[in-house]
Image: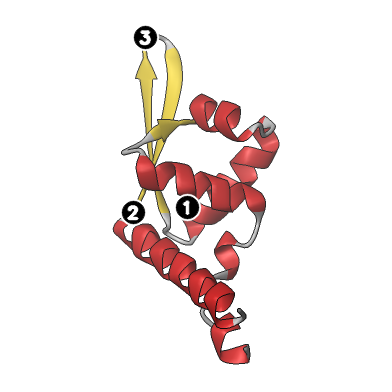
Amino acid sequence: MKELLEHINKAFESKARLGIMSALMVNDQLDFNALKELLDLTDGNLASHLKALEEGQYIGVHKQFVGRKPNTTYHATETGRKAFSDHLRALEKLINGNR
């Protein structure tokens, strides 16, 4: 059991980060407001989780202006895609190993 838990990535333990990565794995990119609405998070809560994922190099950020409004989009990096896929595999092994 301990060996199975070693492969669980702590960066994805929170519900918010799991949701962010799940959304970015199936979408090329999403902007801040789309993620906020999809995950039903406050601005501050979403921003703090995005920052942590960005610092871990799991997501990339692109900032631009659309007209006069700032628009920030996020995407899963290759590092993030691999780490999240590994995390999901570890969860599957954990679940299937305990049946």
- The outermost residue toward the top is 67
Where is residue 27 drawn, in percent x and y? Answer: 35, 38
The residue where tag 3 is placed is 67
Q: Does residue 5 lie above or below 39 as drawn?
A: below
Viewer-nearest of discs 2 and 1 = 2
Q: Quadrant of the N terminus?
A: bottom right
Q: What's the residue type where badge 1 is placed?
A: Glu
**Residue 26, numbered circle:** none
Query: Residue at image x 62%, y 81%?
Result: 98
- Using the image, determine if residue 8 lies above or below residue 75: below
Residue with the mark numbered 2: 77
CA–CA distance in space, label 3 to label 1: 26 Å
Q: Which quarter of the rendered picture does the C terminus lie within?
A: bottom right
Quarter of the rendering containing residue 82: bottom left
- Name the residue at 43% across, 57% down: 58
Residue 8 visible, this orientation:
no
Read off the residue under disc 1: 54
- Element carrying mark 1: helix
Mark 2 → mark 1, Cα distance in angstroms: 9 Å
Which color scheme is applied?
secondary structure
Q: Residue furthest front?
A: 99
Q: Give residue 83's position: percent from left, percent from top.
A: 41, 66
Residue at 62 percent across and 90 percent down: it is: 2
- Residue 56 percent coordinates (x, y): 48, 62
Q: Label 3, label 2: how many angstroms apart (C-alpha)? A: 27 Å
Q: Amino acid at mark 2?
A: Thr
The 10 Å Cα crowd at callout 1, few under 14, some 14 to 19, many 20 or more, is some
